[in-house]
Image (cartoon, rainbow, N blue to C red):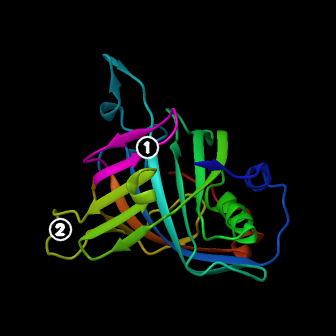
Amino acid sequence: MKVASLLLVAVLAAVTTGHSSSPEWSMNATIIEACSCTMFCSCYFNPKPTPAAHEHGGGAHPYCRFNNAFRVNHGNYGGVKLDGAKFWVSGDLGGDFSKGQMDWAVVTFDKSLSKEQREAIGTILGHVYPVKWNSLTTAEASIDRWEYTKDTAVATMDGGKTAEVRLHRATTGNTSDPVVMKNLKYWGVPRNDGFVMMPNEVEAYRVGPKAYEYKGTNGFMITIDINSKDQAAKPPEAKM
């Protein structure tokens, strides 16, 4: 895995702290997402992750380790087109994110993306996730699979060697249609079409000293929509 230039990290950090100006931009993207919490992730309703899922050697070490695989449906950053762009955010929210301070994250860009596209996505992500990170780095890989049906969703980086998410539709609905949670805020995003409940068969980040893998924990799909006009007014406090 190659670490990208520190420029993008600086852009992300600047946006997160509110010290950046940019041209008009927009992003509508679908995310295949999973984390280490039990279904459904308590992080969306509480300041700490699910304690029961994080036992190590008899002691509790709370964390929320996640994989968010993005595909942009349509978007732009000024004159930079983002339609079809794929990127991935992996990391750990840590044990207490009530003050907006998260542990670490790696933003991995598909190798096909240009420098301009990567910088544009980095800036927009600062608005999607308006938080601070103890560690924030970037990388590149081949996001070679990103697909879904009514029943399943799959995303892989480097054939699963770098990261993998496999979801399956929740079977607790009244019908065979997906179970969808509505009217729940996704971080700093003002609009989404609902959380499609899809527990994971596996969610894994397999490179580096912080590699992890979980099976049967939280997962969902969601389509988000955000643009520069949304940022004219200060957004409400974001939660995950």
Q: Residue furthest top?
A: 58
Using the image as rendered, state which of residue 16 and residue 45 is in the foreground.
16
Seen from the viewer's position, the closer of residues 80 and 196 is: 80
Distance Cα–Cα, label 1 vs label 2: 33 Å
Looking at the image, is mark 1 or mark 2 earlier in the sequence? Answer: 2
Q: Is residue 193 magenta?
A: no
Residue 132: x %, y % from top left: 67, 44
Tell me: residue 236, above or below residue 36: below
- Measured as percent of width and height from the top left, residue 207 is found at 49, 42
Q: Residue at x 62, y 39 (%)?
A: 99
Residue topped by disc 1 = 206
Left-right relation of 202 to 101: left
Q: Residues within 10 Å of mark 2 (few under 14, many from 20)?
A: few
Above or below for 198 versus 45: below
The amino acid on which the numbered mark 1 sits, given as a three-letter code, is Arg
Q: Is residue 94 visible?
A: yes
The residue depicted at 62 percent of the width and 43 percent of the height is: 100
Question: In which quadrant of the rendered view does residue 181 lie?
Answer: bottom left
Is 206 one of the magenta-colored residues? yes
144 vs 44, nearest the viewer: 144
For this rendering, which residue is in front, 7 or 197? Answer: 7
Q: Secondary structure at mark 1?
A: loop
Question: Which residue in the structure is indicated by mark 2?
Answer: 173
Q: Which residue shows up at 22% across the image and 62% down it? A: 170
Q: Kindly identify the residue that appears in the image at 83 percent across and 70 percent down.
A: 22
Give the image location of residue 225, x and y in percent.
Answer: 56, 75
Please identify the quarter of the rendering in which residue 168 is found.
bottom left
- Where are the magenta residues, as a range? 201-217
Structural crowding at the residue carrying mark 1, measured as other residues with C-alpha within 10 Å and reported as few (<14), some (14–19) or many (≥20): some
Image coordinates for residue 185, horizontal then vertical, percent: 50, 62
Number of dots carrying numbers: 2
* Foreground: disc 1 or disc 2: 1
